[in-house]
Image (cartoon, coloured by chain):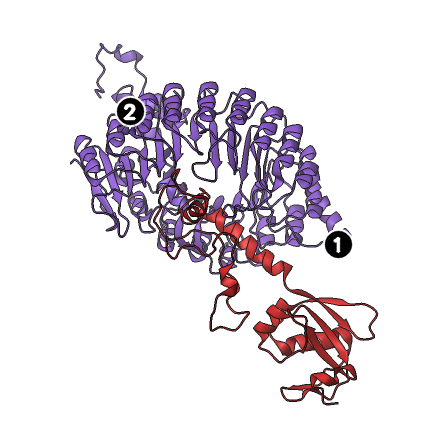
Chain colours: A purple, B red
Amino acid sequence: MDLSPKQSSPSESTRFPDEVLERVLALLTSPKDRNAVSLVCKDWYTADSWSRRHVFIGNCYSVSPEIVARRFPRIRSVTLKGKPRFSDFNLVPDNWGADVHSWLLVFASGCPFLEELRLKRMRVTDESLEFLALNFPNFRALSLLSCDGFSTSGLATVATHCKNLTELDIQENGIEDLSGDWLSCFPENFNTLEVLNFSNLITDVNPGVLERLVSRCRSLKVLKLNRTSSLDRLQRLLVSAPQLTELGAGSFSEELTLQQHAELKYAFGLCKNLSVLSGFWDASALNLSAVYPACSRLSFLNMSYTALQSPELASLLPHCPCLRRLWVLDSVGDKGLEAVGANCPSLEEIRVFPTDPFDEDMLHTVTESGIVAVSQGCPKLHYILYFCRQMTNAAVATVVRNCPDFTHFRLCIMNPGQPDHTTNQPMDEAFGAVVKACKKLKRLSISGLLTDLTFKYIGEYAKNLEALSVAFAGSSDLGMQYVMEGCSKLKKLEIRDCPFGNVALLSGLERYESMRSLWMSACNVTIDGCRSLAREMPRLNVEVMKEEGSDDCKADKVYVYRTVAGPRRDAPPSVLTFSGL
Amino acid sequence: MEGGVAYEQGLNLKATELTLGLPGTGETEGQGGVRNNNKRPMPTSETNEEESQALKAQIVGWPPIRSYRKNSLQEKKDSEGEASGMYVKVSMDGAPYLRKIDLKVYRGYPELLKALEAMFKFAAGVYSEREGYKGSEYVPTYEDKDGDWMLVGDVPWDMFMSSCKRLRIMKGSEARGLGCGV
């Protein structure tokens, strides 16, 4: 990459002073735009470096903290993602890495004015949280999603020392929940909180403390309670903070007297600005009706932690005319999904999670009829995540005919390798229909009985595909080859339990440097194959996670990613790193 | 496939398993969740139904549900178990209507008896293994899984909790056969 301008540059007087350039560039916020800008010429690269305020790092090992701090000395906000996505499903050993501490050490001296830190799948210890709280005086916003390694003590240090905290967002983490005392660590005069999400935690927080905190923080917009928060507390909090735009209710199953129900309904009625509702562990049908008055502006409803039945959903939905995103459990059944189709014309996203993923005899589940019913009533649908136990090619074809604008299509037929249940054929034509009809498709997850034909379709038609997730599919190396050859925009590829070997792995040689990462587990790749790949492509890190008792030559789990930081030095003994350097 | 599967197709072998523990101990078993067995043979067309059931039970990380969500579901199941509790009907001879109590709320016989005494306004007397309840007109009894009427207090609390179907506070005269010393 040659940064010096080849043509003769315009005369000095028409060049922008750096300050002007920086001001102009400051208006560009998207990382993609910023990255493009930095490639124009050296001046623009420098101006971008000085004016960049937010950095998104999709793989913490693709770059080192030193490089980031050196290039962007004035960043205020960092988003870091660590472990491969399959760590969410227990496929990555606990001590794999992605520890945030080394980043904090470098930023403390290199970017001391850091205000926001958003981490996903990183290891975060209490020690790191304390370091963060004590070394960044302007720190304002902390978001931890799917992280692990910390306890409520770490949260206590953040609450104690971050005087200007506006956001504390703790979601879906492996957190050691010692006590609810951390909330009491916010000083009595502290009032800057705008976002508080502690839905992750089990232990109860001191009730008076929460109420007082909420009433002090007049700018509070997002409040997500944990499941031990009672309805009584919820009612008082709503009365105190009717300005909320996002609410996560706690448990919703208590028996209420008529008076209490009326009071709760009244409290919900005060909230005229709610656009997001979530939480609701174990909601009872009766209690749900208290929520109706708050639903008129609702755009996102997340009921995926309570086994809602179809009549309850059917009663709730007419109160949500603006609904654009809906997450539910499959307890609503096909009938519930029919109600969705009938009541949500603006729906853009639906996610249906399984109530009982491991029990196959469960009667309440959704089938192909459900997904078809939604597609018939919701032509704007562009995001679907659907867990089911049966599907047909015809149904999927109908769905994408009704909704050709899918950008995210994630179908999980829970029984691996299951064919179309009416024709007993593979599900190849289903995904063929998806990639042919949905030109904007960016993310695809496939399942069911699938041959190489599925991959041929994907390689041929899914030209905008950026993320592909494959499990228990394909017949030969050809499958993966089709994808590597055809999907030029692919950034993330995850494969498990497929018959793809070294030939398949090496077919992507030229592609991996344009991708964020490749994951292959329980396939037919060997250590030699990994070594070859590493030798050919020195700017890739090729890592193999060995399982106990497996053959020496087998590469049980392979993780390949591009990097400018070289092979990492913090890998545990069970992770072998191959590098061409 | 050794050692991974708790249930054969349809047969609950655990129920008839011989152990040295008393009945009622070790009842709760973790259902589902992630097995640590990393052997993940792929289901092939030759795999028969039963084998594929077992294979599925052993697949790590499938279906792809986040641990957080899985744990939430599991907690829900556990707490539902607690919420549905062990409600048993309690009748008292001569009382016009029955009551219902949740046995899980009590930690042992003394608490249970105190609660019953308060609920029905009677005194149970002093319990001894040899003579049953001495010094009382009323005797707490229960119907067990086999349909037999037993004296409350004879068996260990855990065994009682798992075998008690309903409670009846019997009037002394009827209770003579149960060892009441009146």
The answer to whether A256 appears left or right of A527 in the picture is right
Residue A407: assigned label: none
> Toward the viewer: B17 or A534?
B17
The answer to whether A246 appears left or right of A545 in the picture is right
Kindly state the secondary structure of the residue where label 2 is placed.
helix
Number of numbered markers: 2
Do the residues indicated by labels 2 and 1 lie within the same chain of the protein? yes
What residue does disc 2 label?
Answer: A45
Q: Chain of mark 1?
A: A
Kindly state the secondary structure of the residue where label 1 is placed.
loop
Mark 2: few/some/many CA within 10 Å (<14, 14-19, 20+): some
What residue does disc 1 label?
Answer: A257
Where in the figure is residue A58, as x and y percent of width and height? Answer: 35, 35
> Toward the viewer: A154 or A444?
A444
Q: Chain of mark 2?
A: A
Residues tagged 2 and 1 counted as in contact (Cβ below 8 A) = no
Look at the image and tell me whether residue A570 can be seen.
no
| Amino acid identity at mark 1 | Thr
The answer to whether A151 appears left or right of A506 in the picture is right
Instruction: Name the image quarter holding the C terminus of chain A.
Output: top left
Look at the image and tell me whether residue A226 can be seen.
yes
> Toward the viewer: A309 or A52?
A309
| Above or below for A16 versus A554 | above
Q: Nearer the viewer, mark 2 or mark 1?
A: 1
Where in the figure is residue A488, as x and y percent of width and height? Answer: 33, 22
| Amino acid identity at mark 2 | Tyr
Q: Quadrant of residue B5?
A: bottom left
| Above or below for B101 versus B140 | above
Instruction: Name the image quarter holding the N terminus of chain A.
Output: top left
Mark 1: few/some/many CA within 10 Å (<14, 14-19, 20+): few
Rounded to the nearest whole Å, what is the CA distance between mark 2 and mark 1? Answer: 65 Å
Where in the figure is residue B92, as x and y percent of width and height? Answer: 78, 74
